[in-house]
Image (spheres, rainbow, N blue to C red):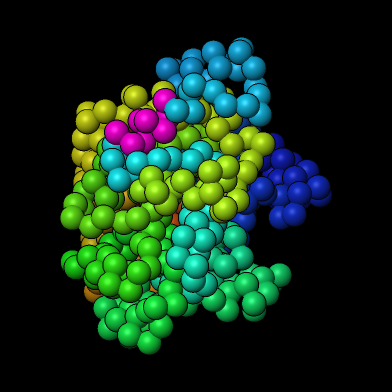
Amino acid sequence: MAAVTGNDAAFDRARRIIPGGVSSPVRAFGSVGGTPVFIERAAGARLYDVDGREYIDLVGSWGPAVLGHAHPEVVAAVQAAAARGLSFGAPTVAEAELAELVHARVPLAQKVRLVSTGTEACMTAVRLARGATGRDLLVKFAGCYHGHSDALLAAAGSGLATAGLPGSAGVTAAATAQTIVVPYNDFAAIRAVFAELGDEIAAVITEPAAANMGVVPPEPGFNALLRELTSRHGALLVYDEVLTGFRVSAAGWWGLEGGVEPDLFTFGKVVGGGLPLAALGGRAELMDLLAPLGPVYQAGTLSGNPLATAAGIATLRLADAGVYERVDAASVKLAAEVTAALTRAGVPHRLQRAGSLFSVFIGLDSPVRDYATAQQQDTGAFRAFFHAMLAAGIALPPSAFEAWFLSAVHDDAVIARIADALPAAAAAAAAAMPG
Ligand code: HOZ
C-alpha cells in the first residue's frame, strides 16, 4: 500500500470541511482524476507542494503570474502597502494610478472601475450594457466563460466545460432566458440572431480570443462582424479580456488584433498581479452611468483594495516589452516541443494559439473553431498525458479545456525541463487512445 503523503493528508482534511476540498472546482482534478496538489509556495516558474516536491508551473494561477511567481518587486510593493493598512473602504490615490495604467495601455478604456473578480467585472459590464441601452437581451458564445454570475452561466466554458456540464443548478430559467447562446466563430448564426432580434439586444459579450474551451482564436473578420452588427443595431460590444488582457500583449488581444473598437472591456488576472482585483473599462459616457454618477449600481467593500491595487500597479509597471517578448518566445518554443513529441508518438492533435496562450486538443487534427468541436477532443488521452507530466514534475492545467500559461521566467532551461517530460507523456496519451 502506498504511503500516505502530506498532500493526501491535506486533501483529506480539506475535504472534510470544504466542499470537494477546494475553493474553486477546476482545482479539484475532477476531470483528470487523482489528488489535487496542495501548494505551499511558489517562486519564479516553480511551485512547491506540501511534501516539498517541485513542479514547473504551466498554470500561473490561471493567468496572473505573467512575471513568474512572487516577483520580488511585486512582493515588496504588497508588503509596503500592507504596512500602511489592509483595507480602508475609502478611496486611495493608487486606484487612480492603476486605472491610468490600464487606460495608457488600452486607451478605449477611457474610464475604469476596479472590482475584485472577473465574475464581478463581467456581471457589471452586462448590467451596464442593459442600463445604457434599456434592452434586455444578451448574446454570448458557447464555450466562452465570463465568470459565474447567473446570466452568463449558459453553455459556459472553463470549469463547466471541464465537468461536462451544460449549466448550473440554482440558475433559474428566468435568469438565462434573456441570454442568447451562439456558436463561436459562426458568422451565419450571429447574423441570423441580429436579423431577428437585433433591436432588442443590449450587448454581445465575447472572449475576443476564446481561451476557456481550450484556445480557439477568432476567425478573420469575426470580431469585426460583431462590431458591425452591434453598431448597426445600437447594441454594445463587450470584450472580456480577463484571460488575455495584459497577458498576450501589453494591450491584450485588442492590442494584437487592431481595428475593432469595443464599447466595454473586462480585465482580471494580470491586472491584479495575483491578488483579487479585476476591472471594467470603456467609453467615459458609458462608464459614467455607474453609481454614484449614474443609475447602474455596483459596489464592493474590497473593490480597489490597497494590497491588490499595489500588486496590479507593480505588475503592470514591470510588464514591459521585454516581458512580452520573453513570454512569446517561451510559448513558441514550448508549443513546438509539444507538437514534436505528440507527432513522434503518433498522437493526432491540434495545438491552437492566441498570442502566447495555447492549448492542445488531443485526438483532433483539424481546426477547432467552436465549442462543439472542442468537446470532441479525447479527454481520456489528455488525462494520461496530464498525469505523466505531473509525475515528471510538470504542472499542467488539470483540464483539457484550459489554456497553458507561461511567464517571462520560463527560460530555455525551464522549457528544456518540460521538453524532457514530453516524450513519456506523449507515449502515455498514445496508449490511452482507442486502438
Ligand atoms: N477562470 C480560470 C480560467 N478559466 C479558472 C479559474 C477557476 O475557475 O478557478
Residue in front for this viewpoint, 81 or 235: 235
Residue 212 image point, x, y percent: 43, 60
Res. 378 image quadrant: bottom left
Residue in front for this viewpoint, 194 or 425: 194
Q: Main secondary structure of the magenta part?
A: helix
Residue 80 image point, x, y percent: 54, 13
Residue in front for this viewpoint, 403 or 81: 81
Who's the residue at 44% across and 77% down the image? 200
Specify whether 155 is left or right of 167.
left
| Chain part drawn in magenta | 97-104
- The vertical placement of 202 against 95, above or below, is below
Specify whether 332 is left or right of 6.
left
Which corner quadrant holds the C terminus? bottom left
- The vertical placement of 227 against 254, above or below, is below
Specify whether 303 is left or right of 144.
right
Residue 51 image point, x, y percent: 62, 33
- The vertical placement of 249 against 142, above or below, is above
Whether residue 287 appears in this view of the structure is yes
Specify whether 24 is left or right of 21.
left
Name, please, the residue furthest toward the right.
16
- The vertical placement of 283 against 197, above or below, is above
Res. 193 image quadrant: bottom left
Q: Is residue 55 magenta?
A: no
Whether residue 206 appears in this view of the structure is no
Who's the residue at 36% across and 62% down the image? 237
Who's the residue at 48% across and 23% down the image? 94
Residue 359 image point, x, y percent: 34, 57
